[in-house]
Amino acid sequence: MKKLHLPLLAGAICLAFLSTAQDSLKTVNLEEVVISGNKVIERKSDIPHQIDLILQPQINKISPLTTADALANSGAVFVQKSQQGGGSPVIRGFEANRVLLVVDGVRMNNAIYRAGHLQNSITTDPNSMERIEVLQGAGSVIYGTDAIGGVISFFTKKPMLGDSVNFKGKTNGFVRYSSANEGKTASASVNLGNKKWASLTSVTASDFGDLRSGGKDMMDYPNFGDRNLYVKRINGQDQVLINDDPNVQRGSGYKQLDVLQKILYAPGDGTEHLLNFQLSTSTDLPRYDRLTTLSNGQPKYAEWYYGPQTRQFLSYQLKKESKKWWADNVRFTPAVQLIDESRHDRGLNKILRNNYNESLTIYSGNLDLYKQVGGHEIRYGAEVTQNVLESEAHSDNLESGQKVDIVSRYPDGTYSTAGLYFSHRWELLDRKLILSDGLRFSSVTIDAKFDPRFFDSDMAHVRQHTQSQNLHLGVVGNLPGGLRLNAMLSTGFRNPNIDDLGRTFETNGGDLIVANPDLRPEQVFYREIGLTQNIGTLGFLNINAYFSSLTDAIVPRPYAVNGQDSVDFMGSRFRTLANVNVGKAKVWGITASGKFQIAHGLTLRGNITYTEGRDLTNKVPLDHIPPLFGNTSLLYETTKFFAQANFLFNGMKKLADYSPSGEDNEQYATPDGTPAWQTWNLYAGRQLTKMLRLQIGVENIADLNYRTFASGINAPGRNVVVSVHWGI
């Protein structure tokens, strides 16, 4: 932490200096607009929630390899990684299925989103993003289940119409090389449009090699995370080999393909029809943290990888300005998603490979309406989803080729949700006082059937139906002198999904986890208060404090089945556990951010987040709580050139502050926990011609060897990123 003092002090001095220099500086546009707050375009300053924006120009300047990297580099979100091909975002102490991911208005969270660490954010393409919005804090009134910690909304680019009956074409793209993983990426998009029709096609293909970690070790932890041993199968035998360069994290590379196709038809009269198709697929994704697990000094696994992760998405969206008594604007979005996931593992010198395959079909429909009556803005709507899950598992004998069915990771089943919401905002005293409120009614149904070949009939069929009600109250006060105050109270929930109820029949330390049909939703009561000071024409400084109370938290506990504390399973007797609602926890923290235009073309921005969390039931630290983190950036930009310096930092996470649940991955940390780290990063770009631009970035300039909290893979070492962009 001591190394953080100087940059933080320097930042504080800069802020103090800037606050006295406002007269000579250019105005910063403070009226940013957002969509995720209430699913309509509105002023960010009208919303009591904190919402962080990651816009397309910001993404383009740093040229992130994945969307998870774009989130991490923003400084607004903490990101955990179990492998290079991943990134699990953490918002205000909540992670995985307690954070809702939304793409183009459709929820990505599904029946098998788990509570540990989720890597699904990389199935969206950062190069096709128009913007990313991070709604901090409970958002269940508008979005329903899972939005306990917050909502990350991905908005992909929209086709652009032309101004005549003749199609006008525009194409752009880039090729990129990154040295830390010898990564190669090619991306191209084509937009064709006339007065009423437009088409946008975007394709990105990436080939990421094994990731090289930093060469400069932290003095107290030499060789931390070095990849000394790896396994290769030679002539039908597993061979443990010595890595000739321990900084190269062998077994971390993968390839990915992302496709976006949108077709827009705008006949006029305020009506738009949009067809949206997305495809994301990959090669096998090595689970790097498991591959580095040792047993008696040898790798525990010869193989551990996720199979190709495929996400197919198809939606139709109708937008219409109705100007009826019941709505001024209507948006209707039916969608279908096809998700294929799998995991495969084989122990060292074992001949059986276990294969677990999941296939999900997700149907959904969203209806969102907006009506303004005087100073009152009314938003209301409905959402329905149905997840259909098919799960299969088998083992392969590498010597005989024999395939044997084994118990699947999940049951086959359905997971259905339905919700109605109402949101209202009232602007008073010429927008000096803005009141908001909202209410939602939600219903969730699960019907899961386990394979009777493996389970007793009393345990083979689980049904559940739950209901939740959520509310939101907020106030924004625009006071004299450019001061803005915001405060809000909100409740949120996360309903148990099939992962909670159905990923049950597996051994856990000699015990067997079984289904609990009486499991209730987790509930959160969220409070936030904030202050924003607009400093003349210079910029703004914002600070928010938040407090969450989590009740009915889902945790595993001993559980009786038919009055018995143990059952027979697969020829053995096991003590039974089940997920139950007994947990209580609290999470609190503070965030600060600022943006200041120092001079024409020169902008300073930064943010910092501090979070604490406590499991009140077990009186231990809560899991998923990141250390202090944030960033500072200084951008100079003209019409043909930009240069940007970024400073990213994380504080120390001591081992004593780790949760004993295991979710914080103590086994991948140093004996003291996760050390503090800081990286300096430089980016620059030059418009060479009207159609050609060259960009160069150098990340982790000091080549520091470090690992982010709870992660199972070291971060990239010094990384030179070179890209050539074109646009016609």
Image (cartoon, grey):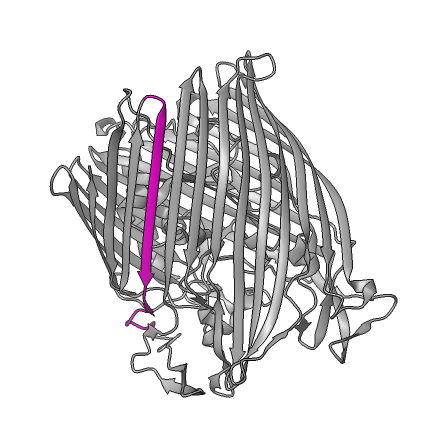
Q: Residue at x 29, y 79 (%)?
A: 245
Is residue 404 visible from the viewing direction of this image? yes
Q: Looking at the picture, how far across and down is residue 595, in whole percent?
A: 33, 37
Q: Looking at the picture, how far across and down is residue 56, in whole percent?
A: 33, 40
Q: Residue at x 41, y 86 (%)?
A: 240
* Quadrant into which the N terminus falls: bottom left
Q: Looking at the picture, how far across and down is residue 72, in whole percent?
A: 40, 52
Indicate left or right for 216 with 295 as reference: left
- Given residues 403 and 215, the one toward you in this image is 403
Image height check: is 326 above or below 295? above
- Given residues 621 and 582, the one toward you in this image is 582
- Given residues 2 and 542, the one toward you in this image is 542
Furthest-right residue in view?
563
Indicate left or right for 198 with 453 as reference: left
* Quadrant into which the C terminus falls: top left
Examine the structure image and report whether residue 199 is included in the region drawn in magenta. Answer: yes
Image height check: is 110 above or below 617? above
Image height check: is 408 above or below 637? below
Examine the structure image and report whether residue 472 is included in the region drawn in magenta. Answer: no
- Given residues 310 and 566, the one toward you in this image is 310
**Tag count:** 0
Give the extent of the magenta segment.
195-218
